[in-house]
Image (cartoon, rainbow, N blue to C red):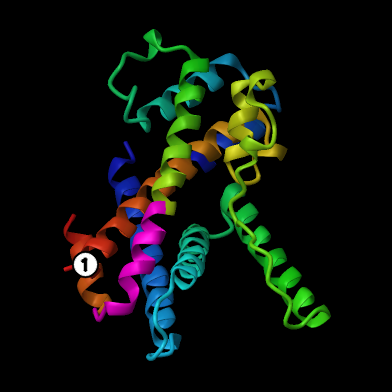
Amino acid sequence: MSSRRSRSRQSGGSRITDDQINELVSKLQQLLPEIRDRRSDKVSAAKVLQETCSYIRSLHREVDDLSERLSELLPTTDTAQAAIIRSLLMQ
Amino acid sequence: MATKGVTLNTNARKIRFARRFISILLKMRKTRSPCSSSSIEDVRKRSQRIKIAAYSSMAHAVGPRRAWSRAVLFKLRSRARHQSMMKRRSFGLQKKRVVVVKNNNDIIPSGQLSQADRLRQLVPGGKAMDMCSLLEETADYISCLATQVKVMQTIADHFSK
């Protein structure tokens, strides 16, 4: 989907319009659990970017915590890869 | 319109990530010597390695199609090169702790930065991006990170059973 957009952007010259930015910002907003459900005209672009930054930071923290947790669990572990993949597919 | 395609795509990416990450985890388990007790230092080192494995597995799962994953893969490669160089030069010296995904935000005081610049520091390779690609890459990066967290959580739950 995004490759289609970048292609059309190239063919239409390198000018970036406000509409394009707005569309991308509202697409970004859809991914943020905090402000996903708010109407996009009620949320400023700066707010979306701010929420994006704090969401990325919180995801990084979660990766840190989970790495630690996995590191503690690893020594006692005896699991088949297939079983985990299967439970992932069930989600 | 492409909702089904997108879900399939995300799912494929999730499975690719999970396979790679789990096989690294299982290898780490095998190489661990059975008699060594797991000291705090061991756990810390291992969690650092697991973290790097998670970020690199996701970047590999996405492949070189994305600018952010290219940036992560490049950083990992130069890190590996740097480390092997250091090892050759000063064998036995304490290895420096290198964090793959840099968090520059605590180096620069955040007060005088625009939101976009702050985002540039969080998204790998973001510094070289124009506004449009920054937003596109951020959207992709976020959904990958969320997937990564979800899979890691599932694995941790599975392991603790």
Compared with A39, B143 (above or below) is: below
Foreground pick, A76 / A18: A76
Q: Residue at x 40, y 63 (%)?
A: B17
Q: Position of residue A38 (x, y in %)?
A: 30, 16
Q: Residue at x 37, y 46 (%)?
A: B146
Three-letter code, disc 1: Ser
Q: Position of residue A11 (x, y in %)?
A: 65, 32
> Residue under circle 1?
B160
Residue B158 visible in the snapshot: yes
Residue B12 visible in the snapshot: no
Q: Position of residue A27 (x, y in %)?
A: 42, 28
Compared with A40, B142 (above or below) is: below
Q: Quadrant of the N terminus of chain B?
A: top left
The chain holding disc 1 is B
- Give the residues in magenta: A65-79
Q: Residue furthest right?
A: B89
- Quadrant in the picture for residue B152: bottom left
Look at the image and say whether residue B12 sits in the magenta stretch.
no
- Relative to residue B47, is residue B102 drawn left or right? right
